[in-house]
Image (spheres, coloured by chain):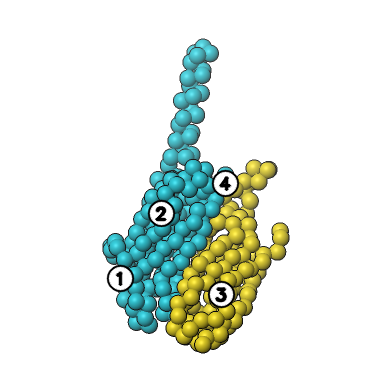
Chain colours: A yellow, B cyan
Amino acid sequence: MAKSKPRVKVPKKAKAGEVITIKTLISHTMESGQRKGKDGKPIPRKIINTFTCEFNGQKVFETNLEPAISANPYFEFNMKVPESGTFVFTWVDDDGSVYTKEEEISVE
Amino acid sequence: MELTRREALLVAAGGAVAVMAGAIGLPAFAAEGEAQKLIDEFTGGATPESGKISLSAPEIAENGNTVPVGFEIDSPMTADDHIETVMLLAPANPRPGVATFHFTALSGKAAASTRMRLAKTQDLVAVAKTSKGAFYMDTKPVKVTIGGCGG
């Protein structure tokens, strides 16, 4: 399978206390475990099961995903930025792989 | 007893209908019961209030493989009064759970959107839990033209 590539959109700058919108996307087949292959056997489930967003080590947003989430899981959510810092986005795969991406923001 | 061709066909058709009812009809009802069970587990038996939360999804989804869905909840999102968890359900999917979202006071606004799979036309359900232990719920009907769960 193609390697999962995370993509994140975070504003570069914000005012203190401003509510910003964060958009994330990761390429992943999100195999639901419901489909059957050509041999008639079910294709085993393989999905991203957890997504988290941390800011300066503090958790901001977390999602537990089920197979009902579409391929290439997309999330849009908000955050109130108190200060400049670093976002760490983490996706956890069923097979144990972890994909991360970091993004900086500067607060004026 | 010997079957005529006509009788044999009738028996076969009757059997097929019975098999289809068993394979398609019953598990769907079971899944809806499962969704109610998930809601009860989530709220601990409390009855969620309507209002405050608004769930958004298209009225008609042409392709059940990617249906954009989002929600927004009216909450101050302060350290002692914020939305903690939101559970999204699709009761008529083979497995009703869709996703569980966890928010913190840092979130600023209790809103999120994603894209999901829908097996068939149904009412989506979102249940939210506040840090004070109150529950809000909203449902939204979505018509699905082509289901998106494979199989």
Dot 3 falls on a residue whose secondary structure is: loop
Query: Can you tell which mark lies on residue A10?
Result: 3
From the viewer's side, name the closer residue of B109 and A45.
Answer: B109
- Above or below — where is B63 with respect to B55? above
* Distance (Cα) linking label 4 and label 1: 37 Å
Dot 2: chain letter: B
Q: Nearer the viewer, mark 3 or mark 1?
A: 3
Residue type marked 2 = Leu
Residue at the location (57% across, 68% down)? A24
Q: Alpha carbon of mark 2 to alpha carbon of mark 1: how far?
A: 20 Å
Q: Secondary structure at mark 4?
A: loop
Q: Residues within 10 Å of mark 2 (few under 14, many from 20)?
A: many
Location of the C terminus of chain B by quadrant is top right
- Callouts 3 and 4 in the same chain: no
| Pointer 4 chain | B
The local secondary structure at tag 2 comes to strand
Of circles 2 and 1, which is in front? 2
- In three-dimensional space, the C-alpha distance between marks 3 and 4, rounded to whole angstroms, equals 34 Å
What residue is pinned by disc 1? B134
- Determine the chain carrying the residue at label 3: A
